[in-house]
Image (cartoon, rainbow, N blue to C red):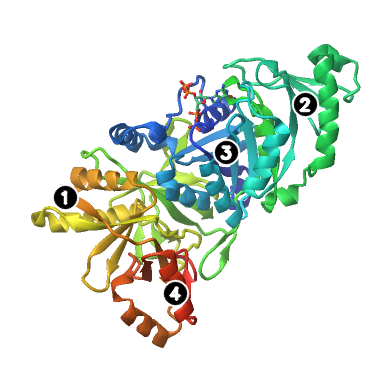
Amino acid sequence: MNPTTEKNKRKTFGIISHPDAGKTTLTEKFLLFGGAVQTAGTVKRNRGARTALSDFMEIEKQRGISVSTSVMGFTYKGCQINILDTPGHKDFAEDTYRTLTAVDSVILVIDCVKGVEEQTEKLMKVCRLRSIPVIIFVNKFDREGRNPFELLEEIEQRLDITTCPMTWPIGIGSTFKGVYHLYNSSLNIYSASKTKKADDYIEIKDLNDPKLPKLIGESLANSLRDEVELVSNEFEKFDEPLYQAGYLAPLFFGSAINNFGIQELLDTFISVAPSPQARETLTRTVSPNEEPFTGFIFKIHANLDPRHRDRIAFCRICSGKFKRNTFYYHTRREKRLKFSSPTTFMASEKTVVEEAWPGDVVGLYDAGNFKIGDTLTEGENLQFKGIPSFSPEIFKELENMDPLKTKQLDKGIEQLADEGLAQVFTFTLGRQRIVGVVGELQFEVIKFRLLQEYGASCTFRAREFSSASWLSMEDDDALKQFSASHRHNIAHDKENRLVFLANSAWDLQQAKSKFPTLKFYETSEYR
Ligand code: G4P
């Protein structure tokens, strides 16, 4: 076995959607089709979007103990598929952005009744930024949804991507009869079934085949002929290189709950989705075919059970072969570490692995060595790029409520920042700490976890900052002048990079125009 042959068998993708579009259902059906699970209900739903904090913490607690929902592997037609789950809740969007750095492609689920929703737009922006190839699954066609042409127009406009329908729906909701394959003239007739594992295709010569009206009725056959003609005039044809470059999104219609449309989605996915790709480091590009092992940490999952304080760091393997009980080089800490029980996640099972290959994700038990973005190698000094911090949207000052627990609070907030739960900025002047997050719920989670896990109690005081910008340090004099005149807005992030916390968009604009030689970056990754 070598990295190239193993890599070629693997496909690692992220599944994204607005909450409730059907991401969990689709994931579960993938596992069912792959034979990895026998029954539905195995994949835990992340109900964060609709629940109160207490329920949310309970869910996270369960997920902390059984982290299998974060990564799920299964085999399908000889392919090893790794699905990386992403939180749907918008307050945890950063977690999703980071997960997207560890995938080679994405499947996006859209609810045909609701169309493109806000969260979908944001997630797709990240995919576009990284040129991640995307396949779209328009779900819930058993319900009275929107007209498919209208939906596709909305998808193209709001997500800024060209779509390429691979199948076309016949009817919708109560009249939904199935889908027509635009590329191999066959019909997949719909029947509601929650258990079947394969679709029955009916070959037809073409749309004038006399079998067609017998199968779907005269009126639907007529509209299908008209619609398919329109589709071929209005939409791009499938083109693999364009899909792989992230410009063209093949699109399928179906109903995940009824196992309908899953097989054609999976079959296309394994034939066109990219296998593990080369990845950039600060110094060079690492090819997945290289013999030496390299990987990076893209997610850290805390165990919320106070009896088990350890965390799991998720490492995406980029090249070579990862082996259990072997020393690897942690490039940031400049130290060697070995892992006695690395785990992989097959469906709902978590198992200790002896070896893993490019594209795989292994869970490493961690007592505090890792931060998001850390790189492991066999000795080479590398740092993988691609895990930026974005400017938070809400900023609050951390206040210690128990001076006797200062050390615990310091350690706790540092570790939570390492996990990526929040960003912490420390003022150069005064040393106050500003915690920045994307959604209010994160403050509640931080407060709860600091108390539960570190025994530290804190509160948060609102501060009027509107954005964080990372400053480049090239022009030393300008930087000194700027820092002196903006003392109350200059802080350091946890990597000690200089950050400007602007009070308003106008202030940021003013700062930019007064100091034209300084560069203000929207993300921490500007090197
Ligand atoms: P999410 O992970 O994206 O948040 O969505 P999830 O799969 O949990 O699905 C959200 C709801 O949509 C669920 O209903 C699910 O059963 C339903 N659903 C998923 N696919 C389809 C489909 O193809 N057709 C229809 N009609 N519904 C679908 P729920 O009532 O919220 O939960 P449950 O009681 O069914 O578990």
Which class describes the residues within 10 Å of circle 4: few (<14), some (14-19), or many (20+)? few
Mark 1 or mark 4, earlier in chain: 1
Density class for disc 3 (Cα within 10 Å; few <14, some 14-19, many ≥20) is many
Residue in the foreground of this view, choosing between 477 and 79: 477
Please tell me whether residue 502 is drawn above or below residue 277 in the rendered image: below
Looking at the rendered structure, the kind of residue marked 1 is Ala
State the CA–CA distance, disc 2 to disc 1. 60 Å
Real-space Cα distance between discs 1 and 3?
A: 42 Å
Mark 1 to mark 4 CA distance (whole Å):
39 Å
Q: Amino acid at mark 3?
A: Ile
Count of numbered circles on the image: 4
Q: Are marks 1 and 3 in contact (CB under 8 Å)?
A: no
What is the secondary structure assignment of the residue under circle 2?
Answer: strand
Q: Residues within 10 Å of mark 1 (few under 14, many from 20)?
A: many
Percent from the top left, x then y, of residue 180? Answer: 77, 26
Tag 1's secondary structure? Answer: loop
Q: Nearer the viewer, residue 54 or 274?
A: 54
Badge 3 or badge 4: first in the primary sequence: 3
Q: Position of residue 409 (x, y in %)?
A: 19, 55
Q: Is residue 288 visible?
A: no
Callout 2: few (<14), some (14-19), or many (20+) C-alpha neighbours within 10 Å?
many
Query: Image check: 53 left or right of 95?
Result: left
Query: Residue at image x 37%, y 70%?
Result: 500
Residue at the disc numbered 2: 180
Q: Which residue is mark 3?
A: 81
Tell me, yes or no, whether the two marked residues, 3 and 4, touch with CB atoms within 8 Å.
no
What label does residue 510 carry, if any? 4
Which label lies toward us, 3 or 4?
Answer: 4
Residue 430 at x, y percent in the picture: 21, 71
Give the residue at the far front of this rendering: 506
- Image vertical order of residue 204 relative to residue 21, above or below: above
